[in-house]
Image: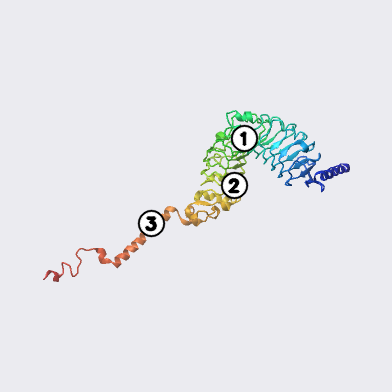
Amino acid sequence: MLKLLLIFAFVVNSVLSDLCGNSSEYKCRCKRVPEPNTRLPVIVADCSDLNIDAFPSNVDNDINVLKLSVNDIEALDPNPSKIVSNDLQTLDLSYNKIASINDEFFLGIPNLRELDLSHNLITSLDDDSVFQNLNQLERLDLSFNKLQTLPDLLFMKLPNLKYLDLSYNPLGGFLTGSQDELKQKLRLSVNVTSLSLNGLNISNIPSTYFDDFNDLTYLSLADNSLDNIPAVPYSVEHLDMSGNNLTFVSARYLNYHSLKVLHLNRMPSLKEIHHYAFYNLVALEKLSITDCPNLKKFSDLAFDVASKNNHLHPKYLSLARNGLQKLNDTYKYFFRSMDHVDLTQNRWRCDCDILWLKEFEHVLYMPSEIRCFVPGEIKHKSILDLKEKDMPDCYPAIYGKKSHRILIIVLVSAVLVLIGLIFYLLRYPVNWLGSKNPIGPNSPYNLAATGE
């Protein structure tokens, strides 16, 4: 054991002297940390944010994790900076200015498992051999680049690829077209478990595209141009459809018994949640429907009759920043077992039907920000701060029934009118009688007037 420690100390000192020591031009920060899965020590060289403009030429063979993010590297070329390392497993090149990658650059790192090239300026990958020899690669992030096309068999040559992120590349024109266009141009290994295709302007996904992806558990299709939820594998546990063009949510498109997390955010077109929309999602734990201003009603039966539905147990619900006006009190059966509920910034109608929320302050996120929108006299008032006097109709034991209050008001008004009439009669009795021949100087019954 002592010998192993001495050997490891020698390796660390070697790395420090070659890449991170005082004599190094890069001054990277190196440390030994336990690997999360095996707990064995690995060497991490953090060279992030050091204004490096070219890939280092002295990468030590014993480095396991190399971080070069937030630098000024413009190209990955094997000359003179060819990597030769059997121990390098993670390479982070995100947030650079990389525009081109030589096909031979990755040849010397056959055991690389994670590669992050996100947030660069890559416009194209010359051919499908650019990642040749990366047979152990499991995670590849190409998001936020400028890719407009992809080599046909690029990802098929990565047999162990589990995680792929192509988000926010201008690939819409390349991937859209006929029904089979996406399947032909985006060929993936069926071993992929996590796939992110956000912001690619995809308008249609063939119903058979995911037929063979039996291991896919995470799928994100946010910020595309999809009109409905496409057919996805029954293995999917996390689905993000935010930022698409859905107008309604229906059980017809949500029949996935393994789905645990569902995001349906940022959709101005969304107007309806149909009855039983989430009835089949028996494993659902987290549902997020936010920033949909035209969604004014959340169906009372979206989960079937909540009081009788024993097979659904969501723990997290977010309905923030929609146009919702009311939420049926049957949802209190779900709220009792939930850990987090966000109902902030909606257009709540504060009447007797909303007071049930007050008993769930312990699970409501920022409960003081759940405010009334109507009626106007209590607009912007927190629902939790509502008092009996704000809503007298809801407290008949204190204020009586509304019909009784109206009758009292009518009777009081009648009494006041009668009092006013009596006062008028007492003040102006003659004028009120309105006699046409009043007794007086001009009366026809006056003797002087008749000359007698």
Q: Position of residue 401 (x, y in %)?
A: 45, 53
Give the CA separation, mark 3 to mark 2: 44 Å
Give the CA separation, mark 3 to mark 1: 71 Å
Q: Earlier in the sequence, mark 3 or mark 2?
A: 2
State yes or no: discs 3 and 1 in contact (Cβ < 8 Å): no
Q: Judge by depth and name the residue closer to the eye, 12 or 70.
A: 70
Residue type pointed to by label 2: Val
Q: Position of residue 105 (x, y in %)?
A: 75, 35
Q: Residues within 10 Å of mark 1 (few under 14, many from 20)?
A: many
Q: Nearer the viewer, mark 2 or mark 1?
A: 1
Residue type pointed to by label 1: Leu
Residue position for label 3: 410
Q: Is 143 displayed left or right of 428 in the figure? A: right
Q: Earlier in the sequence, mark 3 or mark 1?
A: 1
The N terminus: image quadrant: top right
Residue position for label 2: 341
Residue position for label 1: 171
Task: Indicate how the structure is coloured in the image.
Answer: rainbow
